[in-house]
Image: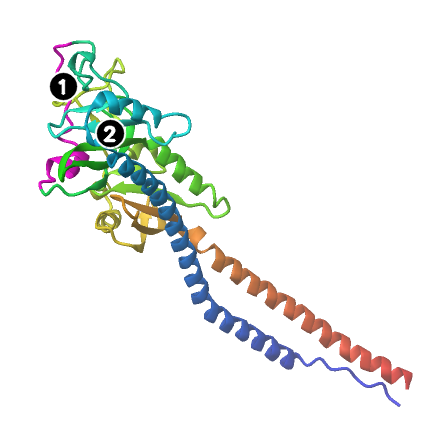
């Protein structure tokens, strides 16, 4: 009896492999949109988590300041009694506030950081002189909102724009509440939070995602950058050649601001307009010559908007990994199939020999 001849079903093999490839391509086309949606949801959740954490921190400070404003001691507006109470809130157990400010309807103010003993401890431009000019917070947004323009004597809690402190020269944000007595506004109490606290909070949030890095930027309601991965974008105090702070006409520190609405690229300006308007969304833009996906939204109960910038390559990494997985699956399937095609006929030959 002649030995049965083993054939190589080349066409059948190619057809089978083509079917496998077509199936994997179909799976890819069906799953990639789902992966895109999952990526978007992941970064949206991350932005929401960051915004919520910042908002929670500031809301806690607002509650503390509101409680102070409701105390009879504060409502008396008698600084000799108020100052010890506020100073006790600046102990090691209460590290979130850098100082407190007690503002008067006249726009003059007291602060736990300094004061002129010759002028009833009010803050002045020279606290060692009885003839010094008193400082005014009339141009500060937190005074205008809570006292100056509050003609209806409403209870107002307000988070200021970031600013440079009159007293210490640091970057700060003030959490402010109007103080009422017998239905009328008699002043304000403001807790100063060093902007380093906010910076530390955002830095901490970013370290939570070491394998999928994000870059955050935070802008105020007027579009100025107050947090950015490029430190040159953030407010800078102007100093002279001797290192002294340059003052403006009302003796505030002169600063250099960078505004997202003044950026050169139209795409970045468009993003800035959406952030200033308090919108939530997603945009793909070019930053520093690279395509970036930006998720943005307002921080609740503040005047700020937060943006999370994702490099397009990082944003597409999951899809790339999935495509590589499908390619590996196809190659593995091809190898297993070819092995079986080779093994099964060989096994038939062995059976024939035994007969």
For the residue pair 103 and 264, the one nearer the viewer reads as 103
Q: Is residue 143 above or below residue 32?
A: above
- Residue 32 is left or right of residue 187, and the answer is right
Label 1 crowd bin: few (<14), some (14–19), many (20+), radius 10 Å: some
- Residue 210 is left or right of residue 186, and the answer is right
For the residue pair 96 and 212, the one nearer the viewer reads as 96
CA gap between label 2 and label 1 equals 24 Å
Q: Looking at the image, which residue is at 77% across and 75% down? A: 343
Quarter-of-image position of residue 152:
top left
For the residue pair 153 and 202, the one nearer the viewer reads as 153
For the residue pair 64 and 204, the one nearer the viewer reads as 64
Callout 2: helix, strand or loop?
Answer: helix
Quarter-of-image position of residue 337:
bottom right
Q: Looking at the image, which residue is at 24% across and 27% down? A: 101
Callout 1: helix, strand or loop?
Answer: loop
Q: Looking at the image, which residue is at 36% across and 38% down? A: 229
Residue 140 shown in magenta: yes
Q: Main secondary structure of the magenta part?
A: loop
Q: Is residue 141 visible?
A: yes
Q: Looking at the image, which residue is at 64% across and 78% down? A: 13
Q: Marks 2 and 1: CB-CB under 8 Å? A: no
Q: Find residue 236 and report its horizontal and vertical position in percent.
A: 27, 28
Q: Find residue 209 and report its horizontal and vertical position in percent.
A: 47, 46
Q: What quarter of the picture does the C terminus occupy?
A: bottom right
Residue range corresponding to the magenta coloring: 130-151
| Res 134 label | 1
Q: Which residue is mark 2?
A: 73
């Amino acid at each position: 009896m002649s030995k049965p001849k083993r054939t190589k079903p080349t066409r059948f093999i190619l057809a089978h492999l083509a079917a496998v490839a077509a199936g994997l391509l179909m799976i890819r086309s069906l799953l990639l949109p789902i992966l895109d949606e999952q990526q978007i949801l992941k970064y949206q959740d991350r932005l929401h988590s960051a915004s919520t954490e910042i908002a929670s921190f500031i809301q806690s400070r607002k509650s503390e300041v509101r409680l102070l404003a409701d105390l009879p001691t504060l409502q008396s507006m008698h600084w000799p009694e108020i100052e010890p109470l506020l100073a006790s809130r600046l102990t090691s157990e209460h590290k979130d506030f850098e100082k407190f400010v007690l503002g008067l309807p006249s726009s003059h103010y007291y602060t736990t950081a300094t004061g002129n003993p010759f002028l009833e401890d009010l803050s002045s431009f020279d606290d060692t002189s009885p003839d010094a000019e008193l400082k005014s917070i009339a141009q500060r947004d937190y005074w205008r909102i809570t006292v100056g323009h509050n003609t209806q004597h409403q209870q107002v809690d307000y988070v200021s724009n970031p600013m440079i402190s009159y007293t210490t020269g640091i970057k700060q944000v003030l959490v402010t509440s109007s103080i009422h007595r017998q239905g009328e506004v008699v002043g304000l109490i403001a807790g100063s939070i060093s902007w380093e606290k906010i910076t530390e909070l955002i830095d901490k949030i970013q370290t939570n995602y070491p394998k999928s890095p994000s870059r955050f930027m935070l802008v105020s309601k007027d579009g100025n950058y107050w947090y950015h991965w490029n430190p040159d974008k953030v407010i800078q105090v102007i100093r002279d050649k001797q290192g002294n702070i340059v003052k403006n006409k009302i003796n505030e520190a002169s600063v250099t601001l960078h505004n997202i609405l003044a950026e050169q690229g139209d795409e970045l300006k468009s993003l800035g307009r959406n952030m200033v308007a308090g919108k939530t969304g997603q945009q793909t833009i070019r930053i520093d010559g690279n395509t970036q996906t930006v998720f943005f939204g307002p921080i609740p109960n503040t005047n700020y908007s937060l943006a999370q910038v994702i490099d397009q390559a990082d944003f597409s990494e999951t899809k790339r990994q999935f495509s590589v997985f499908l390619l590996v699956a196809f190659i593995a399937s091809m190898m297993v199939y070819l092995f079986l095609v080779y093994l099964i006929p060989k096994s038939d030959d062995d059976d024939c020999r035994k007969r």
